[in-house]
Amino acid sequence: MKTLYEGLFIFPETLDEENLDQAIVRVKEELEKLGGTLESTTRMGKKTFARPLQKQKAGLYVVMMFKLEGTKIDALKLRLKLASNVFRSQFVVATEAEAAQRA
């Protein structure tokens, strides 16, 4: 059974709009390879980190709501580590109310 997740993705601040679009498509493709479906995408814009991380001072934040089997979330994390344009990612199980609020 597929579970609804909310994923927070941080991309490098050096990406322009076109490259950010490509990075988001790449995450979607990785998700679909594992049998997941993307429900929604919300761009939150550039945010400055509280302290520098790996010599980065800021990042482009994107929240994606997606459905994926719980057993495949670790595989998604591994695939995203190989993607050069994903700086950080974090996943939480979302409720249907949160999904409706994001839409």
Image: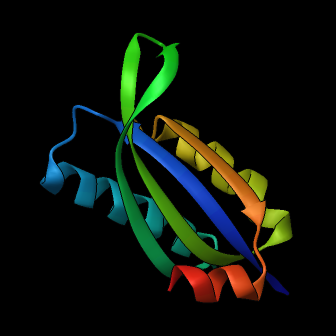
Q: Is residue 45 left or right of residue 49?
A: left
What residue do we see at 44% from left, 56% from top? 62
State the residue at coordinates (19%, 50%). Answer: 19
Q: Is residue 19 left or right of residue 103?
A: left
Query: Is residue 21 or residue 73 the one in the foreground?
Result: 21
Figure check: 51 above or below 13:
above
Q: Quadrant of residue 60?
A: top left
Residue located at (59% from left, 83% from top) = 101
The N terminus - image quarter: bottom right
| Callout count | 0
Q: Nearer the viewer, residue 2 or 92?
A: 92
Colour theme: rainbow
Position of residue 55 measured from the top left corner of the image (x, y, whole percent): 40, 10
Residue 58 in the image, given as x and y percentages of width and height: 37, 28
Q: Foreground residue, 56 or 34? A: 56
Where, by quadrant of the figure, is residue 37 drawn?
bottom right
The answer to whether residue 85 is visible is no
Residue 87, can we see it? yes
From the viewer's perspective, is 24 left or right of 51?
left
Q: Is residue 52 above or below residue 35?
A: above
| Rendered residue at 56%/37% (across/down) | 81
In percent of width and height, residue 13 lies at 28, 33
Where does the image place residue 50, in percent across and percent down from the top left? 53, 21
Q: From what the image shows, is residue 99 above or below residue 47?
A: below
